[in-house]
Amino acid sequence: MSNNNVNILITGATGYLGGSILERLLNHPDFARFKITAIVRSAKKAEKLKKLGIDVAVGSHSDADLVTDLAAKADVVFTAADADDLGAAQALLAGLKQRFEKTGKKSVLIHTSGAATLIDLNANGTTPHQVYDDTDATQIETLPGSSYHRHVDLPLVNADIEGFVKTYIILPSLVYGIATGTLVDLGIRNPHTLLFPHLIRLCQKRGQGGVPGKGLNKWPHVHINDMADLYIRLFDAVIANAPGLGHGREGYYFAENGHTLSYDLCKAVAVALAARGVGTEEPTVFTEEEHKTVSHVHSSMRNLFLNSGIGIGRHLQEFLLAILSSSVECKASRARALGWEPRYGDEEFFGSFDAEVGAALRG
Ligand SMILES: NC(=O)c1ccc[n+]([C@@H]2O[C@H](COP(=O)([O-])OP(=O)(O)OC[C@H]3O[C@@H](n4cnc5c(N)ncnc54)[C@H](OP(=O)(O)O)[C@@H]3O)[C@@H](O)[C@H]2O)c1
């Protein structure tokens, strides 16, 4: 990519992850040469973003023409809205293809997927399971097409192979930490991660921290600031035309900096709740009934759930507990090879639940 101005399109800019990207772009030393466009549903947030120098298209990603038109002008597209929105992904690809056919310019797509694609739903914490390494493209290709997010990730990789776009797929694991910064201060960005507020409210409702079974299952975690570092490090490498930068089938970037047992995570929630007078510090096992209870459904989670192999028509709480009853184990080798040095580890992960519980109980 040349050193001239860079047209950037971003989806999910008002969200937890997308906001982390936009915040870093706003503070990027090369900001003056970026022309950033965000697709945003809220007219009020759009006005605030415009004051920060962002071009805003007010609308939804379900408006395929809008998405295609904007993608057709973009050098770089960041997506961080809904990892399972195939229609939006297809509309983006259509625009990027148009651009390539008209100008010969190959755009870059940095897409947010999720580590749930690596899920082992049968893991019980005692039997061995697959540990995925993002530098092993052949291993990733063993994932079934029915895995979470694959129905979107695979067409993106195929587009890269077809040759009109370079795709980079980022797979965040359990992202934690309450986001801070200008976009949060201005009320533009969601500062909270997806899963934990739901878990906390569920435990609050039952009056006691809970844990699925023995909680021997394992999940990776990553702090929101380290996520932002990863997006921007990759972006910088892309615009600098860094040699040997993996893309397409070699372009999966896991994001983790340690793994947690479900029990330890649930215990941290129980301790923070107990400190606020909700139950005791020892989580109790969620009942079969609780695994099936309907709860508030977040739109991205509903989509994730509906597209999952777990079973269509079941509900968020069930999904949440299914996640905590399953395992993902992976190594973020590709990002580290790029020079990514995550700064937050287990201590910050477990330490984060106090603030998260405080915020969930207040909100
Ligand atoms: N947070 C995590 O731990 C995590 C981990 C792995 C993967 N992911 C995936 O990453 C993606 C983003 O997650 P997040 O935590 O950043 O969620 P989030 O805070 O809810 O952000 C999603 C953003 O996308 C926007 N959006 C969604 N659908 C849209 C549409 N049709 N048109 C326009 N805007 C739309 C939302 O806009 P509004 O402001 O209008 O609602 C929101 O700002 C999700 O697919 C999630 O599954 C998240």
Image: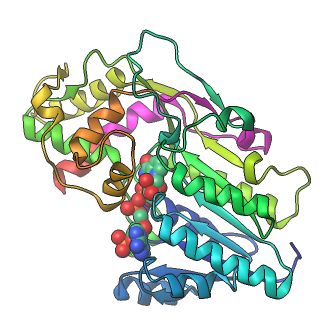
Q: 180 and 294: which one is in front?
A: 294
Figure quarter occupied by ligand 1: bottom left
Is any part of residue 184 visible from this angle? no
Relative placement, left or right, of 192 versus 88 is: left
Q: Residue 74, image x and y in percent?
A: 69, 80
Q: Residue 308, image x and y in percent?
A: 39, 45
- Residue appearing at x 80%, y 62% in the figure: 238
Relative placement, left or right, of 22 versus 168 is: left
Q: Tell me the magenta residue range.
A: 328-353
- Residue appearing at x 36%, y 59% in the figure: 300
Give the quarter of the figure containing the N terminus. Answer: bottom right
Q: Residue 289, image x and y in percent?
A: 10, 31
Residue 337 highlighted magenta (yes or no): yes
Relative placement, left or right, of 113 versus 271 is: right
In the displayed orientation, state which residue is furthest to the right. 243
Residue 192 highlighted magenta (yes or no): no
Q: Residue 57, image x and y in percent?
A: 49, 88
Q: 316 and 42: which one is in front?
A: 316
- Residue appearing at x 80%, y 49% in the figure: 246
Residue 199, placed above or below residue 49? above
Q: Identify the image quadrant of residue 90.
A: bottom right
